[in-house]
Image: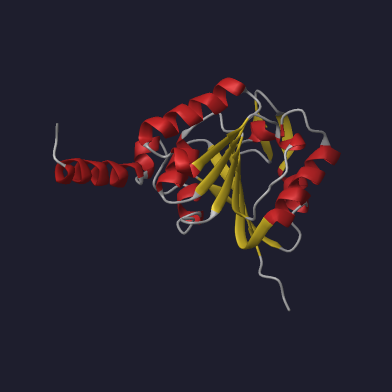
Amino acid sequence: MPTYATWKRRRLKMLAEYQRPEHWGIDPDAALVRALADSGDRHVLVAGAEREGPALYLAARGAAVTALEPAEDAVERVVRAAEAAGLTERIRGYCADLGAWSPDVELHAVVCSPSAFAGLDAQDRARVIAVLQSATADGGVHLVETIAAGSDTLADSVTGVLPIEELASRYHGWTISVERSAGRHQTFLARKEAAVA
């Protein structure tokens, strides 16, 4: 059995590795990494959490993460991975769709995959986005990942198509950008402006 000092040294080395985006299969120059560099001690919603990498990366960086996905096996996968990494105190998993869930804490960031909007019509998407915006702190960010590059729509095999114009129109008063990453993907990023007194 290792001594406490040896265990602690190994644990700190492992935690440092978990804070590297590459460990979770995330490009170190991805919009997620750049936009959420200061997410420690803040609350982040990861919706459409079929991949555990973003939730675990943010938890390892010190964020309190709510992982939301309607598929029970996906939520269980995120929770099991958090347990294996020793990050269970930082991750809450909810088996629900974005249209039926509402935040119970102030959010610093919202990270969604297009599949998070599956089954929602334009009116429901508008309502969900408005709820998330009102729960987001000033300076907070919303990211919608995996936009097919060269297209003006969010698309995947699950959700069909969500026009970028529709998404952008929901973020009046926010600073909006669409960032290209390596490969064929882009990320829609919106930052909430500070309220003017």
- The answer, for residue 90, to whether it is visible in the render is yes
Specify the farthest residue to the right.
123
Q: Is residue 182 visible?
A: no
- Looking at the image, residue 126 sits to the left or right of residue 11; the answer is right
**The C terminus, quarter of image:** bottom right
Q: Is residue 122 left or right of residue 195?
A: right
Give x and y (percent) for residue 111: 59, 44
Give how far across and how far down residue 134 sits, in percent.
74, 56
Q: Residue at x 35, y 40 (%)?
A: 22
Count the numbered circles shown. Answer: 0
Q: Is residue 128 above or below residue 96?
A: below
33 or 157: which is nearer to us? 33
> Image quadrant of residue 7?
top left
> Residue 146: which quarter of the image?
top right
Q: Is residue 106 left or right of residue 29?
A: right
Q: Is residue 33 left or right of residue 133?
A: left
Residue found at x 65% / y 52%: 105
Residue 191 figure quarter: bottom right
Q: In which quadrant will I find the N terminus? A: top left
Residue at 34 percent of width and 45 percent of height:
20
The residue lying furthest to the bottom in this view is 197
Q: Is residue 193 above or below residue 12?
A: below
The answer to which of 44 and 111 lies nearer the viewer is 44
Q: Residue 140 appears at what percent x and percent y? A: 60, 59
The picture places residue 110, in percent across and down from the top left corner, at 61, 48
In the depicted view, which residue is nearer to us: 70 or 157? 70
Query: Residue pushed farthest top?
Result: 73
Closer to the camera in the image, 87 or 30: 87
